[in-house]
Image: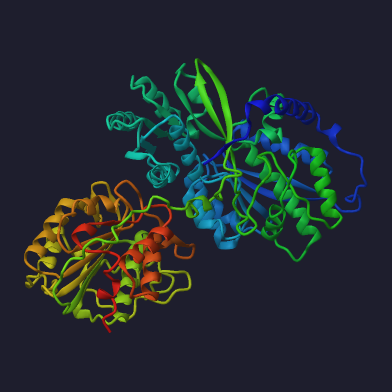
Amino acid sequence: MFISLFSLSKRCLMLLLLIVLCFAACKDDDLIPSSSDNTADIEETTIKIAVILPRDTLWERTIAWAQTNLALANAFVQPEIEWYDETTIDVESVASELANRDDIACIIGCETFENTQTVAYKCAKTYKPMFTFCSSADLARAFAQRGFYWGLRESDITQCEMLLSLAALEGAQKVSLIATDDLYGQTFVDWFAFQATELGMTPTSVATFSSVDESVQAFKEAYETGCDYIIVVPSGPEEVLAISESGEYWNSLYADKAATTATLGEGGYVNFEGVAASADPSSGFSIAYKAHYGELPVPGEAELYDAVMIACLAAAYQQMHTDLDMNDAIGTLLNTEATSQGGWIAGNMRLYFEEIAAGGTPAISGATGLLDFSSSNYTTIQYSTYTHWMYYFGAMANLDYLSRRSSDRTSSYLAGWEWNNSKSQTFDENQTDATYTTLTGNWAVVIAASSTWTNYRHQADALEFYQMLRAQGYDDDHIILIMADDLAYNEKNPNPGVVCRTLDGDNLYVDVRIDYDLNDLTLEDLNIILSGTADADHPVVLGSGSGDNVLFFWSGHGTTSGLVWNDTGEYVTGEMLNRIFTRLSDEDRFRKMLCITETCYSGGVAEKCEGIPGILFLTAANGQETSKADVLSEDLGVWMTNRFSSVLLEYLEANPSRTLRELYLETFNKTLGSHVMMYNSANYGNVYLNRTDEYLAIN
């Protein structure tokens, strides 16, 4: 899944080259080649770069070094830095101001993922160029194709893969994850179980923590699952030290925030290792940095250096090509393919500026490495370099440098959406099909089990499902629609009366009959509605009989405890759903039933319902995985749909008559990031023969 940048046979040669780079980089002015200076007649200008980072010596000296080298390079664009201390400012108000200032060429930031998200939303409004080394998969996926969000580090989907791959190389068959409960930890939570499954391992548990004490408890509970390795994603050194001091020594691998000076200064733990982002060693940046400052750079410094350099080069390119804006200029430069390292050194930067002045487009490399950006999606880097480190008896050792470069999959934010699911289910094509009575009617139950604007996507998906049913011939008397109905005229909705599932989609809030407001219902109310016995408080109930097929669609949140019921703190557990559906089966209340659940961990609920005759479950994820949101709207400030629902609805609307196996394969192959699962086929019938038109094609 990843490759080592160095084999042992090559390390001596590489070390020699790096030593040469080190001495050369320590005296950049000696590296400036004699050449015709195309920049002599070009007036020197400055660009204002806003930096939103803590006022920390490490960040400040990295920028100062970049400024020094740009001056040595005789660059005809020089950076003027406006620094905003991330720890003291109101990030939202500052980001809003900077995004709207014409004199700010670009923004670089932030250190925390939450602040990066805030700044990205503001920059999206004005397409202000933003450079970041934030590695949240959600942010990369939300903004990477917008043309302003320049990610200089791969998403943590790759870091999660590398941690799991290292565990697999050690022979691990069962793995657990504990992660900080924030935007940083979320990427690992989202992708851990999916990747572990694809790598041939069994995920035994996924847990989050919000405090030091919770991290220790989570580690102990993961250990008790009998796993071979625990992947730990801490928010900082406190959790690492607490876990190490707890006496629970077990095979574990740590994500990059464990590799900090604060962590390493405290103890002498033998089996303390993990993965962290690093500059490509072939660039010479790390070793030159150590020669300058006596220590290695921390993750983020190489990306910060590159951001300043790229911004100045892009401003120069824009100056020579006045028809381009700043983002176009950045994209043009990053859409080249560098073949040599060391472009960050003053002498090489000078050559870049000279080529730009002569009307050319240089193929640039940087401190991080070759700056591999995809020609089709060039706003996020394709490949980062990582170090496999170990803290061993008081000293940090880099065991190897790792990269996905030359792998058979793309990387950056696309690593999430371009993983090819290989662990699909198999079904018996020769299974004897069940015998059912003649189909006489169809019913549907559509539930959006969350409320509030933040959860927009769940109601949007439910409305799309409802509109699809109406288009297929269902009347409102045979659809039970349950949703909070707090989107169309929400104060945050810029288009009152409109709810869409895609950026340019149709209004789904047209001729809609909502039977129950989610906020008015309890789980007991749901039980009564499905029971079929109407009363004054429940006039609309599921009136299906022995000849009716029932289509059940649920969109909302889920945990390992069950399907979340609004914000009540209650869950529809697998056992509860089993009791409801078993009663319906015993009472001959349906002929066949297809239950489609779009929630995280939805497979865990479906597993509990296996054995009930005539019911088939299609779930967005297995019992250990999260499902993924899809299509972000900056105008609305929300995700508009879920990936599984999007694939499912588009396929069913275009293909209302397909076999259930074809439906499974379509959703499995295109719902990337989770494993779509089908449950209880043995008690339903042959999925090669049973078709979707039994539920849809009823015109």
Q: Nearer the viewer, residue 556 or 89?
A: 556
Residue at the image position 44 percent from the left and 37 percent from the top: 164
Q: Nearer the viewer, residue 35 or 625?
A: 625
Q: What x and y, as percent, mark residue 440?
A: 16, 79
Q: Quadrant of residue 439?
A: bottom left
Residue at the image position 11 percent from the left and 70 percent from the top: 538
Q: What x and y, as percent, mark residue 486?
A: 31, 67
Residue at the image position 21 percent from the left and 57 percent from the top: 682
Q: What x and y, as percent, mark residue 686?
A: 25, 64
From this view, report whether residue 478 is shown above or below residue 669.
below
Horizontal relation, residue 10 to residue 319: left or right: left
Name the outermost residue toward the front: 430
Horizontal relation, residue 688 to residue 437: left or right: right
Q: What x and y, as percent, mark residue 195?
A: 42, 44
Horizontal relation, residue 250 to residue 534: left or right: right
Q: Nearer the viewer, residue 47 or 350?
A: 350
Q: Quadrant of residue 347?
A: top right
Q: Nearer the viewer, residue 275 or 669?
A: 669
Horizontal relation, residue 599 to residue 384: left or right: left
From this view, report whether residue 460 is shown above or below residue 679.
below
